[in-house]
Image (tube, rainbow, N blue to C red):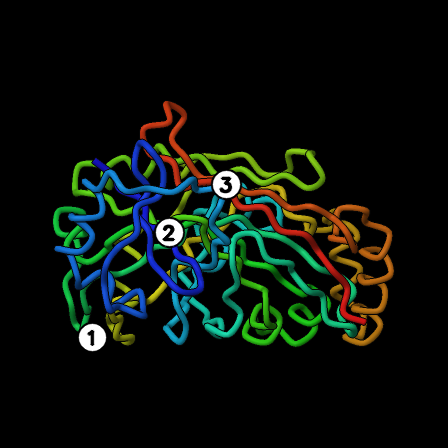
Amino acid sequence: MSTAVLRTADAWWMLTATGAAKVHTSATTTSELLADRPALVAAATSGDTVPVDDLALVSPVTAPCRVVAQMTNFASHVKDTGGDPATVPLTFFRKTSGSITGPFADVVRPAHVRLLDYEVEIGLVFGRELPVGTTVTDDNLAEYVAGLVVTNDISARDVQLPKTQFYEAKSYPTFTPVGPALVLLDADELKRFTDLRLKLWVNGELRQDMTVADMIYRPARALQTLTRFQRVDPGDLLLTGTPVGTALSAPPKPLAFVASLLPPAVKWKMFFKGQARNPRYLKDGDVVEATVATDDGAIDLGRQRTVVRYAR
């Protein structure tokens, strides 16, 4: 049965049927907490609880840690951005762990950014080290993945696209909201990964709604490739991609062909002029909510709610 771990600035908590039970542990990092199983088990059976609404929750994934992300990993998103799911490669990029923020904290758009986008994603949190060369399969995946979290891969598109790199555009402070809960899953529950549905709303309007069945490279395949070159440690975070529905989408093919013939500076000026008229990019005061759960509610990672603020 899944268990949900919560975190406040000064303590860890376990979600129970009656509220949140404090985890009596000396752990200060996610890695240390996952190693203290006796404390987690004791909290799960504790009757000494407080209302969850009384807690000021922060990210259950602590920094510093590795934050790795998969690029264009949902077939619907690949098609929407002009690609072919059958040929899209398995690609990773890094984000700074300094971009991690809480599930109810503000997302701050830097003053130089104009096109701020959202991407609801499932985050894998690791409970065991994966040295380079580790063999990962569907059968042993649960030995390495401790649990899952809701994440939002906030993106500055006008930084990302002309520079053709992701690191800066996705790494500003507050650009990775995480939580509210770190949901620890057993092997049988993790087998239901493809049943999880990702949803994201902006100001109450549903923008993204898709199950993991649309995912191209699922966790075992992704990790088998990642560990060819990248070590992964307990407490590290892997974002697994986003479905269709982001503000950014590909221009019509005729327009894209014409743009490909233009000098880069002219092409990007024309593209961003068009994108500036797109009302789906995030604006000051927008409320972004995200959930990940199975349709039957058996696995529920909770609901994230963040507000966009412009840096002054």
Residue matched to label 3: 303
Choose mark 2 or mark 3, whichever is in front. 2
Residue matched to label 2: 6
Image coords of residue 110 (percent x, y): 73, 71
Camera-side residue of 74 and 145: 145
User: In the rendered view, does 280 fall on the left or right side of 188?
Assistant: right
Distance (Cα) linking label 1 and label 2? 30 Å
Image coords of residue 231 (percent x, y): 25, 75
User: In the rendered view, does 43 fall on the left or right side of 92?
Assistant: left
Dot 2, how many residues are within 10 Å of its Cα: few (below 14), some (14-19), or many (20+)? many
Residue matched to label 1: 132
Q: Secondary structure at mark 2?
A: strand
Furthest-top residue in view?
A: 296
Camera-side residue of 149 and 43: 43
Distance (Cα) linking label 2 and label 3? 13 Å
Please identify the quarter of the rendering in which residue 238 is found.
bottom left
Residue name at image x 59 percent, y 71 percent = 173
Q: Is residue 154 visible?
A: yes
Dot 3, how many residues are within 10 Å of its Cα: few (below 14), some (14-19), or many (20+)? some
Quadrant, the C terminus? bottom right
Image coords of residue 154 (percent x, y): 60, 59
Residue name at image x 24 percent, y 54 percent = 146
Choose mark 1 or mark 3, whichever is in front. 3
User: In the rendered view, does 176 fall on the left or right side of 260?
Assistant: left
Q: Amino acid at mark 3?
A: Arg
Camera-side residue of 58 and 217: 58
Q: Amino acid at mark 2?
A: Leu
- For marks 1 and 3, the one nearer the N-term is 1
- For marks 1 and 2, the one nearer the N-term is 2
Residue name at image x 31 percent, y 69 percent = 29
Image coords of residue 270 (percent x, y): 85, 64
Dot 1, how many residues are within 10 Å of its Cα: few (below 14), some (14-19), or many (20+)? some
